[in-house]
């Protein structure tokens, strides 16, 4: 089979060779030069470079022009799902269409589908519709979230005291450069702990599922606070809700990452994607289940006779969690870390990734442990123990920017 992969996420995370038989299939990877460089040098495949400066689908189609038509087009990054659908349509390749993908990429379509299926969602409106409406007539009056329809990692998300305040801010200060109202929505802010559910769904049936609860929030991370999550014991309510949410948006055979808000009146839908979760969700999932989500999904869609995966029996004492400290709000490319020693040497610290003083960090928002000041995995233990560990960690450790003088002193000592 000829397979075309829109390659964006590192091979270290996907493990392409574990998921696709590169001797049985003709596999081509199309991506930017830096992304293609992270593929193993000995991987039997064709590497096709695209510029990465324009529309992804347009660039992919230009890059593969004149090549044999693929029989399967794969995209694992949420940022490439729509592009892959457009490539399929242009080349006449079977697979998910743009219309089928929109319910798990466009947050307005997503919540409309969920609500129509009877899943509780926050009140919401497309931003353009809200701007044309009388704020006094909106069905909610309290805290309001402004967010991009297809955003990720809470970038360009803002919270305001009321819908009127949100709309006034949009009118007064505008939107982030390069964006427009048609690409945003506003919604009711619902308070409560946030859970995420991750796994694989096969023919509409979730067959490998793990639930976790965030410690802090993705929005807080975007604003500069550390973030983590801990695997929890899934309830029948949570598992049933997961199946309902996936069915509502049409995710039938896929990886999935689902988020919801726990309230006194039950779960409230937040968002869902046909992808695996970020940070160390993949690794903690594998530690708990023995299943590597990305490569197992690739096996399912590229190899004949590969059915639903088997997952080792659940053990409530063998939960895992992850944490990550942001660097994008520090204002410098280097930092100093203090207060971490007793956590780093704890038996609960399964993996610890820490930048040395003077070692550069990324100044853009990232969840990757190679980009940030501090990240890691904790476990195994029960959920309460791991939750307490992360909360103590977040309260005790300090990650601070290095001043130019400190950076100069660091260089002088070397």
Image (tube, helix red, strand yellow):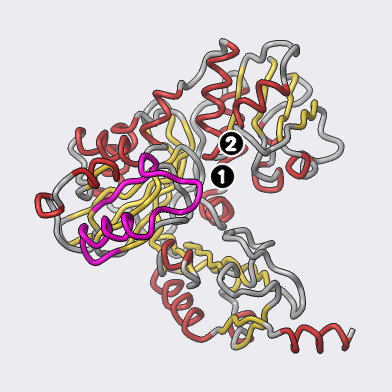
Where's residue 195, x and y in %?
35, 57
Instruction: Measure the C-alpha gap from mark 1 to mark 2.
Output: 7 Å
Tell me the element at label 1.
loop
* Point 23% across, 46% down: residue: 130
Q: Height in image: 344 above or below 144?
A: below
Q: Quadrant of residue 202?
A: top left
Residue name at image x 50 percent, y 30 percent: 82
Q: State the extent of the magenta-drawn residues as a range.
A: 160-187
Q: Which residue is mark 1?
A: 291
At mark 2, the secondary structure is helix
Assess whether mark 2 and mark 1 are in contact (beta carbons under 8 angstroms). Answer: yes
Depth order, front residue of 347/128? 128
Q: What residue would you read off at disc 2? A: 296
Residue in the foreground of this view, choosing between 401 and 306: 401
Q: In the depicted view, which residue is nearer to us: 127 or 25? A: 127
Query: Of 314 and 343, which appears nearest the observer?
Result: 343
Residue 165 belongs to magenta span: yes
Report if residue 139 lies within the magenta region.
no
Q: How many marks?
A: 2
Quadrant (top left/top right/bottom left/bottom right) for the N terminus: top right
Give the percent coordinates (x, y) of residue 395. 47, 84
- In screen coordinates, is 245 left or right of 106? left
Give above or below for 290 relative to 382.
above
Please tell me whether residue 234 is drawn above or below residue 406 in the rendered image.
Answer: above
Quick check: 153 above or below 129?
below
Instruction: Kindly identify the residue that appears in the image at 26 percent across and 55 percent down.
Output: 167
Q: Please report the residue visible at 38 percent of the width from the left and 37 percent of the height from the top.
A: 106
């Amino acid at each position: 089979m000829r397979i075309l992969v829109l390659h964006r996420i590192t091979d270290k995370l996907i493990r392409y060779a574990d998921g696709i038989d590169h001797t049985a299939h003709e596999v081509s990877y199309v991506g930017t030069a830096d992304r293609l460089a992270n593929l193993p040098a000995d991987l039997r495949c064709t590497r096709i470079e695209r510029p990465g400066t324009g529309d992804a689908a347009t660039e992919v189609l230009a890059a593969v022009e004149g090549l044999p038509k693929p029989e399967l087009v794969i995209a694992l990054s949420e940022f490439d799902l729509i592009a892959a659908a457009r490539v399929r349509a242009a080349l006449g390749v079977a697979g998910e269409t743009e219309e089928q993908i929109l319910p798990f990429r466009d947050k307005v379509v997503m919540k409309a589908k969920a609500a129509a299926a009877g899943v509780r969602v926050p009140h919401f409106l497309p931003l353009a519709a809200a701007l044309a409406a009388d704020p006094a007539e909106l069905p909610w009056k309290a805290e309001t979230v402004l967010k991009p329809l297809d955003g990720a990692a809470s970038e360009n998300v803002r919270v305001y005291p009321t819908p009127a305040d949100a709309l006034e801010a949009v009118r007064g200060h505008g939107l982030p450069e390069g964006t427009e109202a048609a690409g945003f929505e506003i919604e009711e802010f619902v308070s409560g702990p946030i859970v995420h559910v991750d796994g694989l769904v096969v023919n509409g049936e979730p067959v490998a599922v793990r639930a976790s609860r965030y410690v802090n929030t993705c929005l807080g991370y975007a604003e500069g606070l550390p973030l983590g999550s801990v695997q929890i014991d899934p309830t029948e309510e949570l598992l049933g809700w997961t199946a309902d949410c996936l069915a509502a948006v049409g995710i039938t055979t896929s990886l999935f990452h689902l988020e919801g808000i726990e309230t006194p009146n039950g779960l409230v839908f937040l968002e869902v994607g046909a992808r695996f979760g970020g940070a160390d969700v993949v690794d903690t999932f594998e530690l708990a289940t023995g299943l590597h989500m990305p490569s197992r999904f690739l096996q399912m869609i590229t190899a004949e006779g590969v059915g639903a995966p088997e997952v080792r029996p659940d053990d409530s004492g063998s939960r895992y969690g992850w944490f990550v400290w942001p660097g994008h709000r520090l204002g410098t490319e280097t930092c100093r870390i203090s207060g971490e020693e007793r956590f780093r040497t704890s038996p609960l610290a399964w993996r610890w990734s820490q930048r040395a003083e003077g070692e550069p960090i990324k100044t853009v928002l990232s969840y990757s442990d190679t980009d940030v000041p501090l990240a890691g995995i904790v476990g195994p233990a029960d959920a309460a123990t791991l939750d307490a560990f992360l909360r103590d960690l977040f309260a005790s450790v300090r990650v601070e920017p290095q001043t130019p003088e400190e950076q100069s002193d660091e260089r002088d000592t070397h």
